[in-house]
Amino acid sequence: MDYLPIFMNVKGRPCLVVGGGDVAFRKASVLVDAGATVKAVAPEFSTAFTGQQSIERIVERFRPGHLEGAILVIAATDDGAVNREVSRLARENNIPVNVVDNPDLCTFIMPSILDRSPLMVAFSSGGASPVLARMLRGKLETMIPQGYSRLTAFCARLREPSKAHIADPARRRIFWENVLEGPIAEKVLAGDEAGAEAMLLDRLGSGKPEQTGEVYLVGAGPGDPDLLTFRALRLMQKADVVLYDNLVSKPIVDMARRDAARIFVGKQRDNHTLPQEEINALLVSLAKQGKRVLRLKGGDPFIFGRGGEEIETLAAQGIPFQVVPGITAASGVASYAGIPLTHRDYAQACVFVTGHLKDGSMNLDWGALARPRQTIVFYMGLHGLETLCAKLIEHGLPGSTPAAIVQQGTTQSQRVIKGSLATLPGIAKIEKPQAPTLIIVGGVVSLSEKLAWFHPNKSAEMAS
Ligand code: SAH
């Protein structure tokens, strides 16, 4: 170890920053965040300091007297002689000193920090590569969600009750491991602290070990794995069983915990591998076995995803669950196709509609859909394409209204097939787009001409 890592309590203690530029300001702000009483000394200060009342500014050149009483000092001037002088004097007086970007003059160095107070993670490369330390912090940012602040505070609050109930430290450790790995912690992270506390106290009272499983209903986004949310990824890494259907791309299923069991529950058009009721029942029975069940759904679970039906059963059976939103196809696909859904020159509203045929027909409020300055996004609409284009024209939209089919949006197989309400059905017959496809209708579609930026396979894309 080149340095001793410690966390120092500076609350209400005097700290000195020498320097008045932006770097000095950043250092002073960290000290303020940690509760220190901060003085900054410099002949002049950058504007960054102006709004910050908690830093006392001393508009003077540095002199030894400024160090008086300080328990810590940071030098961040662009004058090497001043920095050396600060370092020398501080060391003579046994005051910990840091000189920015000059490890030789430091008696302590500042780590890169991940702040989930009261939880703090500090990274240091011992001065060898601050960039590397920052990059590692970035990686951990995704794994330690903001909610860990609340989780840590929750643990602090319930430490005493847990000690009162479980005297044996070893048993208490196991208890807390179960809490932090199971539904109680998930409840806190999902924002239900009262529910989590009730569950924890109940478990303390009953002395029963962890038994209940839980279900995560997670939106996996439209296809590109990069569009997963942090929370989706974290729960995917935690699950014991994964239930997925064919809208979830393989690279995404592969990102679930390696030893998690994977169950394909199907859903191809007209070929439901498992009927919805059986999926609902399976979620319940797996959770009752104590498993952490991940139900992965394409896009967002609450947008044409039947997510509501799946959790109704769970709620009825008292099984803990949480729902993680995903980027719905309309949003993801439109972005990747360069179609701003509500560009204000063309649209003031955007509607998401299911174009799923029931008994060969589409029972939609065509009058409400065929409005000017409105973008319409059809999910599951390809089989009814001809009907929907004809109906929109019949109800008043011009045949020249731009319309597009986006195939497998956001993936390497994305194709954007463009036409108008009058021409698109004919074009689709020739182009034969592959599922899943989204149909977008409205003036905004014409913008993709200049705004398309994602070109997975140039030869596959066609414009007409
Ligand atoms: N819950 C999902 C939608 C499920 S309905 C969501 O929020 O996106 C299934 C329909 O979504 C498909 O028929 C298709 O219309 C659309 N869809 C899903 N992913 C798509 C993609 N990558 N590209 C184009 N359309 C997609």
Image: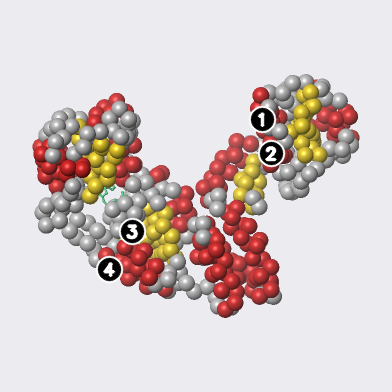
Amino acid type at circle 3 is Gly
Amino acid type at circle 1 is Gly
Q: In the figure, is residue 57 to the left or right of 208?
A: right
In the displayed structure, would residue 302 be above or below residue 44?
A: below
**Callout 3: CB less than 8 Å from ligand 1:** yes
Q: Residue at x 66, y 46 (%)?
A: 122
In the displayed structure, would residue 246 be above or below residue 440?
A: below
Amino acid type at circle 4 is Glu
The residue under label 1 is 51
Q: Sequence-wise, which precedes: disc 4 or disc 3?
A: 4
Q: Nearer the viewer, residue 277 or 123?
A: 277
The residue under label 2 is 30
Q: Residue at x 23, y 45 (%)?
A: 378
Q: Nearer the viewer, residue 189 or 435?
A: 189
Q: Sequence-wise, which precedes: disc 3 or disc 2?
A: 2
The residue under label 4 is 277
Amino acid type at circle 2 is Val
Q: Quadrant of residue 332?
A: top left
For the residues bearing labels 4 and 3, Cβ distance under 8 angstroms: no
The residue under label 3 is 307
- Between label 2 and label 1, give the one nearer the viewer: 1
